[in-house]
Image: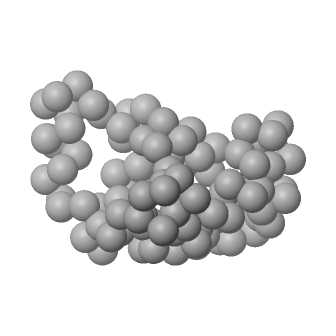
Amino acid sequence: MSSQGKPPPPFAGELGRRLRAVRTTQGMSLRQVEDASGGLHKAVLVAAWERGDRRISVVQLVELLRFYGVPVTGLLTAGGLLPDGMPDAGRRLGLDAAEAVL
């Protein structure tokens, strides 16, 4: 159960592992993320997202990935977290997350 009272979605663990991999590949600690983002991304919150213990909103995900310089579609479609056709479906709805990040 997440701290928000709802169970995390089934993909939360995998998303968290991917977020942690992005951060560690960039050689950043959780504290460094908080400091470098000017406090926008709190270390305790990023840690909870990485563990899959707390839900991350689309806005929070886009902001965090923008900070890391990583496209949303690359993070979510690699390895099947979302179906490959998902970004195109989102674009038809005017939800182009890939352009919002880079």
User: Residue at image x 22%, y 46%?
Assistant: 87
User: Residue at image x 33%, y 70%?
Assistant: 10
Instruction: Determine the residue located farthest toward the front in the rendered image.
Output: 5
Instruction: Determine the residue located farthest toward the top in the rendered image.
Output: 94
Name the side, left or right, on which 69 lies relative to 83. right
Q: Is residue 19 visible?
A: no
Q: Is residue 45 visible?
A: yes
Name the side, left or right, on which 18 lies relative to 34. left
Quarter of the image where one finds residue 88: top left
User: Residue at image x 18%, y 50%?
Assistant: 86
**Position of residue 17 measured from the top left corner of the image (x, y, whole percent):** 52, 74
Q: Measured along the vertical axis of the image, is residue 102 above or below residue 12? A: above
**Position of residue 100 measured from the top left corner of the image (x, y, whole percent):** 43, 32
Q: Measured along the vertical axis of the image, is residue 93 above or below residue 77? A: above
How is the model colour-coded? one colour
Looking at the picture, tell me which residue is in the foreground, 69 or 55: 55
Query: How many numbered marks have been drawn onto this rendered protein structure?
Result: 0
**Position of residue 75 measured from the top left corner of the image (x, y, whole percent):** 41, 60
Looking at the picture, tell me which residue is in the foreground, 68 or 59: 59
Name the side, left or right, on which 74 lies relative to 31. left
Quarter of the image where one finds residue 92: top left
User: Residue at image x 64%, y 44%?
Assistant: 67
Looking at the picture, tell me which residue is in the foreground, 59 or 21: 59
